[in-house]
Image (cartoon, rainbow, N blue to C red):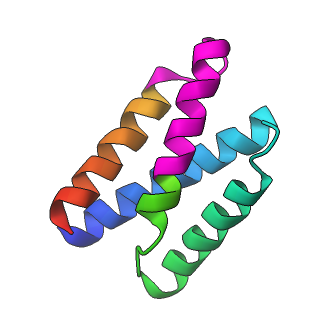
Amino acid sequence: MTNEINDKLRNECQNALDTLKKLNISDTAELQAKLEWCIGSYDFDKNPTGLSAFGGMALRTLKQYKELNPRKVAKKLIDELDAAIRKFETTH
């Protein structure tokens, strides 16, 4: 069960990273690099450390961007990332 939750969080973080890259939001290069590193680290050793923290930062960034550009960020992306972070945090 925990692996499923961790994998879901990893996948939602990857979706957020892909969206950040696609949108080319200024000032997110460092966040993108850290998120990418955490995803790669998780793929290597299955340690989810950092996914929740940097996923949360990505979530906040995407929510702020969506407020200004409602059609450019899917509500589903935000909702699923938020749900994955919450589920992860309740199990760890």
Question: Relative to 21, is 41 on the left or the right?
Answer: left
Q: Which residues are magenta?
A: 56-75
Residue 56 pos. (x, y %): 46, 49
Residue 36 pos. (x, y %): 66, 65
Say if residue 23 shows up in the picture. yes
- Does residue 16 sit above or below 4 in this rendering? above
Residue 19 pos. (x, y %): 66, 39
Residue 55 pos. (x, y %): 49, 53
Question: Relative to 84, is 69 on the left or the right?
Answer: right
Q: What kind of secondary structure does the magenta stretch mostly adopt?
A: helix
The residue shown at (54%, 23%) is: 74
The residue shown at (82%, 38%) is: 26
Q: Quadrant of residue 32?
A: bottom right
Q: Nearer the viewer, residue 47 or 31?
A: 31
- Does residue 14 sit above or below 65 in this rendering? below
| Residue 30 shown in magenta | no
The residue shown at (59%, 20%) is: 66
Q: Quadrant of the N terminus?
A: bottom left
Q: Quadrant of residue 35?
A: bottom right
How many discs mark residues in the rendered view? 0
Q: Quadrant of residue 47?
A: bottom left
| Residue 58 shown in magenta | yes
Report the residue that reaches farthest toward the bottom.
45
Question: Relative to 11, is 67 on the left or the right?
Answer: right
- Does residue 8 sit above or below 49 in this rendering? above
Q: Nearer the viewer, residue 16 or 62?
A: 62
Q: Quadrant of the C terminus?
A: bottom left
